[in-house]
Amino acid sequence: MQESLEGAEYTLVARKPSFGLPTGCPICLPVYTYLKLANLPFHLAFNNTFPDSDQIPYIESGTYVAYNDENGGVIERLKEDGIVDLDADFCSLPEWISMKAMVSTWLADAVMYELWVGSDGSSARAVYYSDLPWLIGKALFMKQVYIVKQRFGITKENAERKEAEIYKRAKIAYGALSTTLGDQTFLFERPSSLDSYLLGHVLFILQALPESSVLRSALLEHGNLMRYAEKLKPDFLEAGSSSSVPQFHSEASSTSTRRPSNSSSKTKTQPKREKTEEEKTFRRRAKYFLVTQVVAVLVFLSVMGGYDFSEVEVDDDEGFGYD
């Protein structure tokens, strides 16, 4: 696989930039930082058509595609396929394994809880739904809140206990990572996927979550984790290294193509340009997406029937108003 893709051009398809980050998605950001840490040149593209797709992020190169929802995620696929592996020297170290498990489970769970349950939802909207019609975005948000509560087994009776457990595990993880890091540049001798997960996590917490965030407050107690992120950010996150000017993808597909730019400065004397087949296809897909999202919301509400949505606390002032 490595030989067949040698010299290939890679494109990372992620959710759009937000909060001053190249991608505001907490799942996409570690993949971005992994490619940066590995010095693998890539283009950055954004998919705004299917904001809640489990396939995002994904990497494509020709006919090769590595989706987030396959074989442990994009990073694991890149390692298994021999494209880039930063973990070869660490994957048998017990301490590295335990640190990686805490970041990918305890901290990932804490971010998910904060986004959908433990906050007003404004950060989640900015990442996933700000490009959708208001009603669809709000309905999909409510649906995701319900899914997250189901995943964590949260009910009215145990909500406080579950929240305490999630934050307790996150604080334990921060303490262990802070101790392991010390004053080093990386958690171990050189960068690994553990650094990509931690760097993406810290930057997302600091830049995407509000000051009232419990998770943010817990992170701020560990100054070396903040210095770690600030030190690596200029070299491995900010623009100007291996990734090119971002493009926009219309669908999560390995056959996605970039549409040519269409100038809005036409005069009335110019003949009307006939739409290309590609543009016609894009418009059909966009209409199909809106219809399917509406149908999905209606089916969801119909199936849930008597579910008491009063458990899902969504207020009018949570940032879902019209811009």
Image (spheres, rainbow, N blue to C red):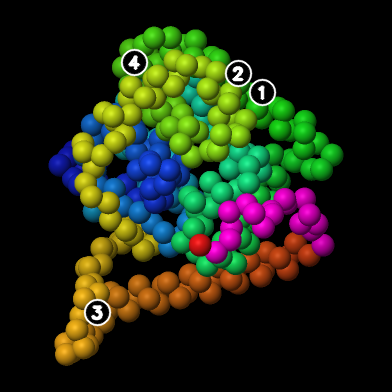
Closer to the camera, 3 or 256?
A: 256
**Which kind of residue does numbered mark 1 sit on?**
Lys
Q: Is residue 138 visible?
A: yes
Q: CA distance from mark 3 to mark 1?
A: 55 Å
Whether the residues at callouts 3 and 1 have beta carbons within 8 Å, the answer is no
Q: Secondary structure at mark 4?
A: loop
Which corner quadrant holds the N terminus?
A: top left
Task: Give the residue pinned by disc 4.
Answer: 185
**Which kind of residue does numbered mark 3 sit on?**
Thr
- Identify the disc placed on residue 168: 1
State how many labels appear. Answer: 4
128 shown above or below 28? below
Label 1 vs 4, first from the N-terminus: 1
Bounds of the magenta span? Answer: 306-322
Whether the residues at callouts 2 and 4 have beta carbons within 8 Å, the answer is no
Label 3 vs 1, first from the N-terminus: 1
Label 3 vs 2, first from the N-terminus: 2
Q: Bin the neighbour count of mark 2 within 10 Å (Cα to Cα): few under 14, some 14-19, many 20 and up.
A: some
Q: Bin the neighbour count of mark 4 within 10 Å (Cα to Cα): few under 14, some 14-19, many 20 and up.
A: some
Q: CA distance from mark 1 to mark 4?
A: 26 Å
